[in-house]
Image: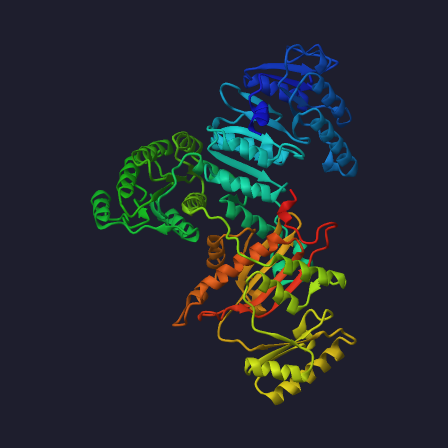
Amino acid sequence: MSSSIESFFSPRSIAVIGASRQPGTVGYQIVDNLLRHGFEGSIFPVNPKAKSVHSVPAWRSVRDVPGEIDLAIIVVPKELVLEVVDDCATRGVSALVVISAGFREIGEAGARREAELMERVHRHGMRLVGPNCMGILNTDPAIRMNATFAPTMPPPGPVSFLSQSGAMGVTILDYAAEYGIGIRNFVSVGNKPDVSGNDLLEYWEADPETRVVLMYLETFGNPRHFTRIARRVARKKPIVVVKSGRSSAGARAASSHTGALAGKDFAVDALLAQCGVLRANTVEELFDLAMAFGTLPLPEGNRVAIVTNAGGPGIIIADACEAEGLEVAEFASDTLARLESIFPEEASVRNPVDMIATANAESYRTALNVVLEDPNVDAAIAAFVPPLGVRQEDVAAAIVDAARRHPRRPVLAVLMGREGLPQGRAELQAAGVPGYIFPESAARSLAALWRYGQWLRRPVQAPTQFVVDRERVRGIVQAARSEGRDRLLEPEGYAVLDAYGIPVVPHALVRSEEEALEAAGNFGFPVVLKVVSPDVVHKTEVGGVRLNISDEESLRREYASMLDAIEANVPGSDVRGVLVSPLRQGARELILGMSTDPTFGPILMFGLGGIYVETFRDVSFRVPPVTELEAREMMASIRSFPLLSGVRGEPAIRFQPVVEALQRLSQLVLDHDSFAEIDVNPFLASSEDGESFALDVRVRLAPEIPGSASSPPNSRA
């Protein structure tokens, strides 16, 4: 894979097919960029109407170009692209970048044109970036290739960048130049029918000069493939993603609690978090993180020292740090004593350190050295508001000096105010200290470093493979499909859970009042009655559930009353029987669920259950497979987790049964592609051993795939 991608980044010769002599055109700008930024190889402009382009000899056709061509940049009208691809094939060109638009992005006709393009690319054994893209870039001094139509060439550095949007790509390169962020490679992938983000991740994984990967994504081509690659790559170098498209409108049609809550953006968050990929909400935040990850070491802890010359910024930074999960450090007593001996009485030496407006560059150097030597400090943020008589460049130099003396502890700077700002930030960035305009940016970036370090320190786990009864589940599903049903009856749902070892409440399906009395006698009162009918989905709304039945007389009365209510509310319904189960109370009601997203496949959900699940929306999501550690993280990440751990003298629930149930549910939905939605709500979590189980379950089947009764979704690449 990497060898085929290498042709894009290290070509010895480039043909620009559609090169132009007219300023303002894409064909003109690409040749201009290659020449102006010093591409080290040969450039062959191809234009049938020009003898030269930018004073470089031009050729009528790529067939006429002398010598070998490693890379072809195609900038011709869409109608001519296929012919040009064939011409390139006759010359043995292995790598194509198709800038031209007019393919899948314009609709059905364009999609057919793109399919034909890919047929030829595959037939000729080529690789393709694009179509509908802005090109590629490599700042390596031995290559110096800007084969884009962006007017800006960023400085060289350790960051490789993928953009799915050409327009965003131009903005991104401008940002990189302005912020002083060194770029290694840049790729605008366009429609990406061939070279994808997954391909580039694998290429950059093996590139020692790429230390950080940034990605602007609009869609995932193969999320599960991305998951496998990103988990591996993120262990070696950080990946930061801006993923656009946060709409959850598709969830409105979902019938289950899980489906209603699991909007696509939740799936993106879950997938990225599991892979150790950091998600930025905006392009600005993307660059904030890029500055930090491109230069700083990972902090050993989350304790932060704040040094400033004004009280306001210090308070803002402290608030932002705590909001991001960082701790404002408590200084050791000798640190406080040293600071008190240095600064005037008006200064505040407790964290945040406010050196007041008279502080100069030497004050910053001294204060930072003192706090960075404190064993209670893992990182520092220095904020500067420019007073009269103190230059930002001098303060920046002092911050850099202190940071260099403590290379294991990250130091970030906040330079507030416009006067002298660009010079101070540029000096900081060049010296490996990211400089921000706003306090929140620094806190957010430091928190991202801390979270990434925590993820790296996590043990690597493989999902547990439990002994289960797959055939039993297939039989239940096929029986329901044979009746034309897309929902399982509750006893069938219980059976599916039981086949995968997920505990369910004791229950009996009865078809008469006498059988109900016998079952209640076996379980012991009080009991619960629930109607079983394919025509009744929301049983409570039509009188199909009766709770806390305490004796035989009440059972007879409620049994008859429930069947009468069903007949009245759902006339002619197909009642298959009544479920009898013992009443269980006094434990936490949770929800365990799954919903199938057309892009990501099954998504697991965990949270507080019962009737308020969609009201409080206190839930977490993961994309299976889910390991034991990830299941525990799902539980710990909801806001109400302290309720599960025990509050005000209440006992904590037994966590292991819930953790295992989440893992078993993960295995169930990966083993079978038959399920669209599963709601286990409530799952009763007890503080007693053996008393945690599913009280209610709803299962909706996915449309049947021809030729596949129930096969794993990840078996289809």
Taking the image as shown, residue 381 lies to the left or right of residue 61, namely: left
Q: Quadrant of the N terminus?
A: top right
Identify the colour scheme used: rainbow
In the image, residue 697 sits, relative to residue 454, either above or below, namely: below
Image coordinates of residue 308 in percent, x first then y, are 34, 44
Reply above or below: 423 against 515.
Answer: above
> Is 69 positioned to the left or the right of 687 in the image?
right
Q: Nearer the viewer, residue 354 or 612?
A: 612
Figure quadrant of residue 4: top right
- Residue 504 seen by the camera: yes
Question: Residue 703 at x, y = what percent?
Answer: 72, 55
Residue, x 38% and y 72% (percent of image)?
649
Q: Quadrant of residue 357?
A: top left
- Residue 288 in view of the camera: no
Picture coordinates of residue 394, whole percent (x, y): 34, 32
- Asked if 549 appears above or below 343 in the picture, the reply is below
Which sits in the foreground, 136 or 563?
A: 563
